[in-house]
Image (tube, rainbow, N blue to C red):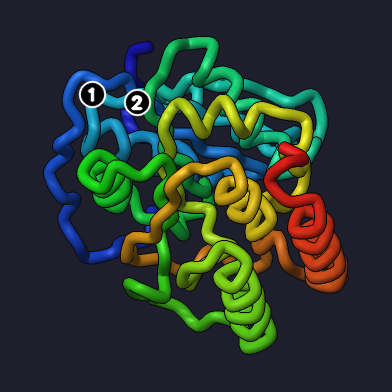
Amino acid sequence: MAQAPAPDTAPLPSSDAAAPRLRLVGKRTVILIPCLDEAPRIAGLVHRLHELYPELDVLVVDDGSSDGTADEADAAGADVLRHPYNLGYGAALQTGYKYALEQGYERLVQMDGDGQHPPEEVSTLLNALEESGANLLIGSRFLGTAAYRIPRLRLVGIRLFGRLTGWLVHRRVTDPTSGLQAMDREVLHFYQQDFYPWDYPDADMLLRVHYAGFRCEEVPVTMLGGPPGKSMHRGMRPLYYVYKLFLSLALTALSGPEDL
């Protein structure tokens, strides 16, 4: 798909860091961006990704946006899949996973479309995935840099779920809610199953990955602040999120690996 000139949209935040040279050779890789109402930002992100990684494909899954997100992404040169209405963050991710499998991709990087995840970190994750031999790499702002103020209650929740998840998987987990991840084809196959959450696939999926015998590691990254009012965890959603994640972790832990 031909890339159009960059439109006059909201500029992307900068991490002030150059992207490490991508060392992935001979493996088809796609960058997955689930989006909901990101029209002011998505074109700039897609253009930056194409500039940094011309050898990688970019897939945007529009989860029922009402602001022209899909059109902006398409005009910028991304492959675009559209949900007819809002199905949830996890559903958008799984749509991308299934597409990647159908198209024969061997590696996938997922990142948010709101500017929180710097494009320069894509190569950080892919290089680490290749060199470490892990199946799943999680970008951790707590091993790297969180270049914004995390609300206190959210920070407490992240640390709580990190400690709980770490205890269950027998290793340190610092950022269980990170949406900046890289994975191989085996994990893509695993994630296309019906147990994948339609809303918040976070610490509970790390536990399932552990039970399935996959190797998961964290790598230091920089994360930036997203636009005001765009967080998935606003209003009453944090209460639902905490309840849902505790319940999902408990059920997964009780069922154990034999239920996979």
Residue at disc 2, secondary structure: strand
Pinpoint residue 201: horizontal percent, then vertical percent: 68, 50
Q: Quadrant of residue 105?
A: top left
**Could you tell me which residue is drawn at 23 percent across and 26 percent down?**
54
Does residue 44 show up? Answer: no
Counting residues from the start of the chain, the first of labels 1 and 2 encountered is 2
**Could you tell me which residue is drawn at 69 percent across and 85 percent down?**
153
Pinpoint residue 62: horizontal percent, then vertical percent: 64, 32
Residue 58 vertical position relative to residue 12 in the rendered view, above or below: above
Residue 94 vertical position relative to residue 120 in the rendered view, above or below: above
Mark 1 vs mark 2: in front: 2
Pinpoint residue 134: horizontal percent, then vertical percent: 35, 44
In the image shown, does 33 or 258 lie closer to the viewer? Answer: 258
Q: Quadrant of residue 127?
A: top left
Residue 128 vertical position relative to residue 148 in the rendered view, above or below: above
Q: Amino acid at mark 1?
A: Glu
In the image shown, does 224 or 105 lie closer to the viewer? Answer: 105
Q: Residue furthest bottom?
A: 152
In the image shown, does 147 or 7 lie closer to the viewer? Answer: 147
Residue at disc 1, secondary structure: loop
In contact (CB < 8 Å): disc 1 and disc 2: yes
Q: How far separated are the C-alphas under marks 1 and 2? A: 8 Å
Pinpoint residue 233: horizontal percent, then vertical percent: 72, 66
Q: Amino acid at mark 2?
A: Thr
Q: Residue 29's mark?
A: 2
Within 10 angstroms of label 2, few (less than 14), some, or many (20 or more) residues?
Answer: many
